[in-house]
Amino acid sequence: MRRVRFFFFFSSIPTVVLCSWFLNAFQALSLTEFGTSRTSDVALVVGQPVSFPFNSSLFHLAVSTARAEEKDNNLLPVVSSPSAAPDALMPLLAPSPTHPLTPNRPVPVLSGLCAFNFSAAAHIVSETATDCWSKLAPYLGNVICCPQLETMFHILIGESSKVNGQLALNTTIADYCFSDVQRILTSEGANESLPLICSAQPSNFTEGSCPVNSVKEVEQAINGSKLLTDCKTVDPVKECCNPVCQPAISEAARRLALKVPGLFSPDDVRVSPIQQSVVDDCENVVLRWLASQLTSDKAKSVLRVLFNCNVNRVCPLIFPDPSEVARNCANTVKNATKCCMTLDNYISGVQQQSLITNLQGLNCAASLGMMLQKKNITENVYNLCHVNLKDFSLQAFGSQDAGCLLRSLPSDVTDETSSGISFTCDLNDNIAAPWPPVSHASTPSSCNKPITMPAFPAATSAWNGQSQAFMIIFLLPALCLAMMMP
């Protein structure tokens, strides 16, 4: 099992100079393998060099490996002996990159017409800005940024409802608040295109088609005590497949939707699209009420688990027509090498879209497999070509071991003063991509997984539970070019 952490370092040196230095340095750079011992801080100790080819593709990921002890098969932070006095891997370390990138960013000018108490949820707003950091948001949007953004929306309205008793905003105020939120997030380093990345819009603050929007009406219609009992603590492992909170939310939302005259009748066998739309909007109102009953940190924890259940049910990648793969894999007995080269090239193009979770990796493998089966590819080409789940996620070019699979419940991006922007993902020791059974007409549910996928991956026998790889990865040419763009 491998644990990956991405670090992004910047300094106050002019961007052109810094990027030029990075690119020239990495052309001749041999990364060093370093060891650590366990006390308090990460240490980089010079050891044997590990070569890594320079590559100017979309992402250039320079990979270094360190070993960290593992106790009781649980992931522990990598720390070092203070007496080691190691040399830094890179000489240019800097404070948090979200601010030095734009050191003269002005304080955002707000409308003054939004009643949100941004101070009460300041840390949630800051966490959202970091999770949606400008250069990372396009690659973490689906799995970290957008779920956190939606969580923040519900918490902000939940907080404001404690003052005005309303769980939704009218369209005019929603426009002002949406603009204010966007300006605040951007001022703290978030991507300016979040509305596009996350399909967010002012209507996220309204009640939509739900007929109830006040705290009083909601509490009269639902069983609030049962909802709090079922949702005040949500098991991140069990909730998605053996839900407790989600049914309680759905039941509460349905009770609110029943306030629409004639929407439901006793004769309804299945829910119509119109009915489902109202229920969905009412679920948002219920989630805001739930957020208002919990502390902001607790509300964030609960909502992120619930939103990630939805995230993990689908593959976020867009697969182009695999006709060329199907053509070259039609006769694997004669053309195994050509088949695997074509499949590898195809997946290499797809994996550049996004970082994905381990459960999304299962869904992506199943989706592509079924596309190939529909083109009469019945042999397990994943097994033939040694395709792994991590192959569907963003990779380090030139390295077979640098594919990053996020956990099913990804941790937040962190903005560390000493080391910059970072986040953690697991490589899961080359879990083979399962070939979907021919009998499956649709993508199998992640709850009926064909292989065991731990929420927090345990070490395999190859590592014997004693060590894990710790990889420090530097995002280079694409990020440098993006930074230099006006």
Image (cartoon, helix red, strand yellow):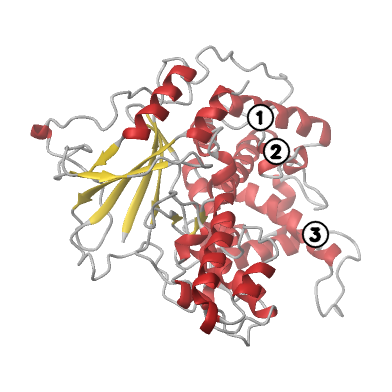
The reply, left or right, for residue 238 in relation to residue 208 is left
Which is nearer the N-term, disc 2 or disc 3? 2
Q: Nearer the viewer, residue 303 or 394?
A: 394
Looking at the image, which residue is at 23% across and 38% down?
Answer: 42
Image quadrant holding the N terminus, namely bottom left
Image quadrant holding the C terminus, namely top right
Looking at the image, which residue is at 47% across and 65% down?
Answer: 389
The reply, left or right, for residue 121 in relation to residue 430 is right
Disc 3: CA contacts within 10 A as few (<14), some (14-19) or many (>=20): some
Which is nearer the N-term, disc 1 or disc 2? 1
| Distance from Cα at disc 3 to Cα at disc 1 | 26 Å
Q: Is residue 225 visible from the viewing direction of this image?
A: no
Q: Nearer the viewer, residue 320 or 92?
A: 320
Looking at the picture, how far across and down is residue 213, in whole percent? Answer: 76, 46
Q: Nearer the viewer, residue 311 or 6?
A: 6
Q: Label 3: which residue? A: 277
Which is nearer the N-term, disc 3 or disc 1? 1
SS of the residue at dot 3? Answer: helix
Query: Looking at the image, which residue sits at the far front?
Result: 334
| Distance from Cα at disc 1 to Cα at disc 2 | 9 Å
SS of the residue at dot 1? Answer: helix
Image marks 1 and 2: residues in contact by CB distance under 8 Å: yes
Image marks 2 and 3: residues in contact by CB distance under 8 Å: no
- Asked if 51 appears above or below 119 in the picture, the reply is below
The reply, left or right, for residue 97 in relation to residue 119 is left
User: In the rendering, which numbered label is found on residue 149?
Assistant: none
Q: Label 1: which residue? A: 182
User: In the rendering, which numbered label is found on residue 195?
Assistant: 2
| Distance from Cα at disc 2 to Cα at disc 3 | 21 Å
